[in-house]
Image (tube, grey):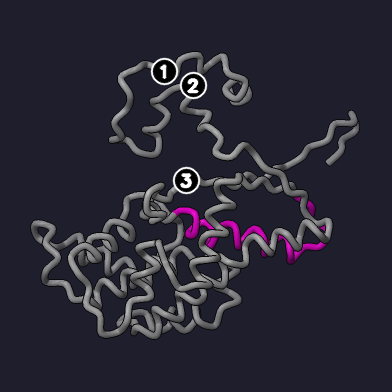
């Protein structure tokens, strides 16, 4: 956007996630790459597709692209290395073990998810039921409770444009509870379709001249941490920090000066 003084404003949409795969097993330790693809990256692509005159610069870090492409291969092969996706794919007759139950609770009821702006009464009822358990015991809860929590976790993380375009989302929203194995498998297919399409969608937008794609170093540093380790506690107040006061030479690094 050019002004009278000849200046140009360029808005860059920066999309990044750190490496979440275990280097030894390839197992995903955190789900953020595919959850943000299901919500934010899909919604951004849809907005760009819906407005032909809109132009944008979109930055993908290589480590994020690698994980998106890895997820696409997982969906294509059915060999899932993401715990939550494997639980969605679980056969109808397969019971949930204690480890699986703990994973669903840890991921679906994580404090950071509570800050999501939109919620649903059915999900809040599941959260309240767990919160009301005396002593935190879950052995009285059925597998159905955990299946419902797992499905609602993914429904909450589905992007608004995906929700509006998906008859499955509408059906599951109307069902509300007691989701079947067929519901879980259909939802897994929808997640796979959306996540696998992210890179091709942005590639098509770039080929049409609608977006300019750029990239960053493979796994760029988290610049705020270079300025102050304490900044980590803005997201995780109880996080253990290094004993050092700050990163040596942090304020003098070019990538720190750019945000100071």
Q: Is residue 99 above or below residue 212?
A: below
Residue neighbourhood size for the residue with mark 1, other residues' Cα within 10 Å, grouped as few (<14), some (14–19), many (≥20): some
Which of the marked residues, 3 or 2, is nearer the chain's N terminus?
A: 3
Q: Nearer the viewer, mark 3 or mark 2?
A: 3
Q: From the viewer's perspective, is 6 left or right of 127?
A: right
Residue at horizontal 49%, vertical 67%? 74
- Name the element at disc 2: helix
Could you give the CA–CA distance between mark 2 and mark 1, rounded to whole angstroms?
7 Å
**Viewer-closest of 32 and 219:** 219
Query: Could you tell me if residue 121 is visible in this image?
Result: no
Q: From the viewer's perspective, is 217 left or right of 178?
A: right
Q: Specify the segment rendered in magenta.
A: 32-56
Pointer 3 with pointer 2, Cβ within 8 A: no
Residue at horizontal 67%, vertical 64%? 46
Q: Residue 205's x, y, as percent?
A: 76, 60
Q: Residue 194's x, y, as percent?
A: 57, 69
Q: Is residue 172 above or below residue 126?
A: below
Which residue is labeled 2 in the image?
Answer: 227
Q: Residue 217's x, y, as percent?
A: 62, 36
Which residue is labeled 1 in the image?
Answer: 246
Q: Residue 215's x, y, as percent?
A: 67, 43
Could you give the CA–CA distance between mark 1 and mark 3, rounded to whole angstroms?
23 Å
Quarter of image, res 167: bottom right
Could you give the CA–CA distance between mark 3 and mark 2, rounded to whole angstroms?
22 Å
Q: Is residue 48 magenta?
A: yes
- Name the element at disc 1: loop
Check residue 19 in the rendering and tell me which mark sits there, or answer none: 3
Which part of the image, by quadrant, shows the N terminus? Answer: top right
Q: Is residue 224 magenta?
A: no
Quarter of image, res 188: bottom left
Which part of the image, by quadrant, shows the C terminus? Answer: top right
Residue neighbourhood size for the residue with mark 2, other residues' Cα within 10 Å, grouped as few (<14), some (14–19), many (≥20): many
């Amino acid at each position: 956007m050019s002004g009278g003084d000849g200046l140009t404003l360029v808005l860059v949409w920066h999309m990044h996630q750190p490496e979440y795969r275990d280097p030894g097993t390839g197992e995903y330790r955190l789900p953020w790459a595919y959850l943000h693809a299901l919500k934010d990256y899909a919604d951004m692509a849809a907005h760009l597709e819906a407005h032909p005159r809109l132009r944008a610069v979109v930055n993908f870090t290589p480590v994020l692209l690698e994980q998106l492409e890895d997820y696409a291969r997982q969906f294509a092969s059915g060999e899932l290395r993401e715990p939550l996706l494997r639980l969605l794919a679980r056969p109808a007759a397969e019971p949930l073990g204690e480890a699986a139950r703990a994973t669903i609770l840890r991921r679906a009821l994580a404090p950071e998810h509570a800050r999501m702006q939109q919620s649903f009464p059915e999900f809040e009822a599941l959260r309240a039921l767990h919160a009301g358990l005396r002593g935190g015991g879950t052995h009285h809860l059925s597998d159905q409770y955990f299946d419902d929590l797992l499905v609602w976790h993914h429904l909450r993380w589905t992007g608004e444009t995906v929700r509006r375009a998906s008859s499955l989302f509408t059906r599951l929203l109307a069902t509300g509870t007691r989701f079947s194995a067929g519901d879980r498998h259909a939802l897994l297919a929808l997640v796979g379709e959306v996540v696998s399409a992210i890179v091709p969608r942005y590639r098509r937008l770039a080929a049409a001249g609608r977006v300019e794609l750029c990239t960053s170093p493979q796994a760029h540093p988290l610049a705020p941490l270079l300025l102050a380790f304490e900044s980590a506690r803005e997201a995780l107040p109880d996080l253990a920090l290094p004993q050092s006061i700050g990163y040596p030479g942090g304020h003098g690094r070019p990538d720190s000066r750019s945000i100071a």
